Image (tube, rainbow, N blue to C red):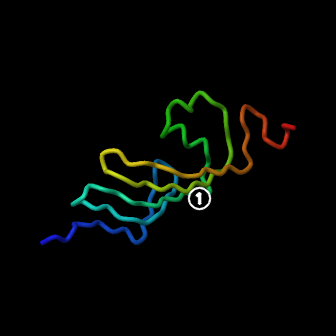
Amino acid sequence: NNTDMLVLFKRFKGRLDDIPVYGSGRINLSKQRINMRVKARQFNIDRLSTLFPALSSWQYFGRGNSQLTIKGPLSSPRINGVFYVKDMSFYGTNPKQIE
């Protein structure tokens, strides 16, 4: 039988630490490949420090949205995406104050 073993995610939602995420995609277990789309909407960006400890020394606040694609071999997938921030403050300064 030449049928690939697939895990299909028509739609999933959950939490990554305290950040709500949702998405869709598939994992091909036979070929050991992944192809997923993941989104996060309206989360406090200071929560990123729990996922990326190096950020914990920075002083930043705001609301974030992100869209990611995760593609490639399961052993080394490529992650691409965009990250949008609204009402950001970085060390007490927001982009509206910078000219």
Quick one: SS at disc 1? Answer: strand
Residue occupying the point 22% across, 67% down? 4
Quarter occupied by residue 7: bottom left
| Residue 97 image offset from top left, x and y in percent | 85, 39
Quadrant for the N terminus, please: bottom left
Assess disc 1: are there few (<14), some (14-19) or many (≥20) residues with their C-alpha within 10 Å of its C-alpha.
some
Q: Farthest right residue? A: 99
Q: 30 or 11, which lies in front?
A: 30
Residue occupying the point 71% across, 51% down? 86
The tally of labels here is: 1
| Residue 70 image offset from top left, x and y in percent | 43, 54
Residue occupying the point 48% across, 59% down? 38
What amino acid does circle 1 point to?
Arg
| Residue 47 image offset from top left, x and y in percent | 56, 43
Residue occupying the point 78% across, 40% down? 94
Quadrant for the C terminus, please: top right
Q: Farthest left residue? A: 1
Residue 57 left/right relative to 93: left
| Residue 60 image offset from top left, x and y in percent | 67, 37
Q: 42 or 2, which lies in front?
A: 2
Residue 44 left/right relative to 7: right
Q: Farthest front residue? A: 2
Residue 49 against residue 7 in the figure, above or below: above
Q: 63 or 1, which lies in front?
A: 1
Which residue matches tag 1? 41
Quarter occupied by residue 25: bottom left
Residue 31 left/right relative to 59: left
